[in-house]
Amino acid sequence: MKTLILNGSPRKDGDTVFLIKKLLSRLQGDYKIVDCYTADIAPCIDCRSCREKLSCPMKDEMQQIMSLC
């Protein structure tokens, strides 16, 4: 099983990271952790390109994250 963990906390050693580590100790399979707080992800501009072309014109780290799904 593959698991994608999105961490939105600004704290590098806070409670969220503690819980993620606890989860990982029991998790089986592959996993990827994305630190959303520091990731280069632009806000959606509602151009609706994703509906028509099934792609986003914004070139940021979100394309890498979506490729993991």
Image (tube, rainbow, N blue to C red):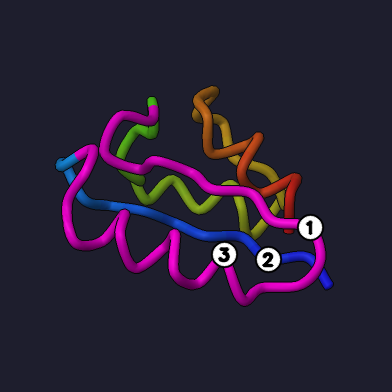
Tally of numbered tags? 3
Mark 2 or 3, closer to the camera: 3
Q: Quadrant of residue 64?
A: top right
- Asked if residue 24 lies in the magenta stretch, the reply is yes
For residue 57, above or below residue 67: above
Q: Regarding mark 2 in the picture, which secondary structure is present there?
A: strand
Image coords of residue 56 (percent x, y): 59, 40
Q: Which mark is residue 24?
A: 3
Query: Closer to the N terminus: mark 2 or mark 3?
Result: 2
Q: Which residue is mark 1?
A: 30
First of labels 1, 2 by sequence position: 2
How much space separates mark 2 and mark 3, taking CA atoms?
10 Å
Which type of secondary structure does the marked residue at label 3 adopt?
helix
Where residue 2 appears, as percent x and y from the top left, is: 78, 65
User: Are the residues at dot 1 and dot 2 in contact (C-beta closer than 8 Å)?
Assistant: yes
Q: Which mark is residue 3?
A: 2
